[in-house]
Image: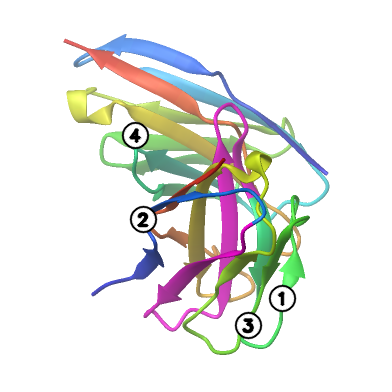
Amino acid sequence: GQNIDQPTEMTATEGAIVQINCTYQTSGFNGLFWYQQHAGEAPTFLSYNVLDGLEEKGRFSSFLSRSKGYSYLLLKELQMKDSASYLCAVSDNDYKLSFGAGTTVTVRA
Amino acid sequence: IAGITQAPTSQILAAGRRMTLRCTQDMRHNAMYWYRQDLGLGLRLIHYSNTAGTTGKGEVPDGYSVSRANTDDFPLTLASAVPSQTSVYFCASSPGAAGGPDTQYFGPGTRLTVL
């Protein structure tokens, strides 16, 4: 089975940095995904990590430590449009995804 | 480029009725998935299909059935709807290439209410 934990909610100020942590215990591992989901919309792909380390993509970065079962998504220079839910998902041995419950980030002016 | 489409967008259904949610993708992806999303529980996999002609059960398959007659379509059927099936349903597809990242792409969702 899969157990994926992430905080329920986070609030930050426009222009700030927010780090969303995700810990997982899974029976198999073929990578970790982060998705963004705005209210009432579909999840959209943000990042993928399969090796340890940091992947940077513009204002967003994602980190993975396989030995610790830990990942984080770093959002820099926050903008109002970054207010959304951020979903951590682990790919198992069959490449199916198990999702955490999501972290709702609210960006305040 | 449509990507993935789902129909209907929303539906209110009486308990006991049969309902089919439609999903079509035009990306020629091999794999397709159905999830339900409930507040506080995140996305949970209902059924999946790795390729046309094959299907498999996910985490919460009871009360649902699927078919995959061709590459593009992956309908989800509720044979006799119950109120606990009230949820937002997302269809997704992925290329299905092993050794991935096998990134999944999601449709816009169907909001289903069973009364």
Which disc is residue A39 wearing?
A: 4
Name the residue that disc number 3 marks.
Answer: B51
Q: Chain of mark 2?
A: B
Which region shows up in magenta? B17-44
Chain that bears disc 4 = A
Which is in the foreground here, disc 3 or disc 1? 1
Do the residues under discs 4 and 1 have CB atoms within 8 angstroms? no
Separation (CA) of disc 1 from disc 2: 24 Å
**Which residue is depicted at the point 67% across and 88% down?**
B53
Image depth: mark 4 or mark 2 in front: 2
For the residue marked with disc 1, what is the amino acid? Thr
Q: CA distance from mark 4 to mark 1?
A: 30 Å
Neighbor class of circle 3 (other Cα within 10 Å; few <14, some 14-19, many 20+) is: some
- Residue A42 position within the rendered picture, expressed as x and y whole percent measured from the top left: 38, 48
Write down the residue under mark 2: B9
Residue at mark 3 shares a chain with residue at mark 2: yes
Residue type beneath disc 4: Ala
Q: Is residue B49 left or right of residue B110?
A: right
Magenta span includes B38: yes
Q: Quadrant of the N terminus of chain A?
A: top right
Q: Amino acid at mark 2?
A: Thr
Kindly identify the residue that appears in the image at 39 percent across and 36 percent down.
A61
Q: Residues within 10 Å of mark 4 (few under 14, many from 20)?
A: few
Q: Quadrant of residue B83?
A: top right
Mark 3 vs 2, N-terminal side: 2
In the rendered structure, the answer to whether residue B68 lies left or right of residue B7 reads right
Distance, label 3 to label 1, CA atoms, is: 8 Å
For marks 3 and 2, give the CA distance: 25 Å
For the stretch drawn in magenta, the main secondary structure is strand
Are the numbered discs 4 and 2 placed on the same chain, yes or no?
no
Marks 4 and 3 on same chain: no
Residue A102 lies, in percent from the top left, at 52, 30
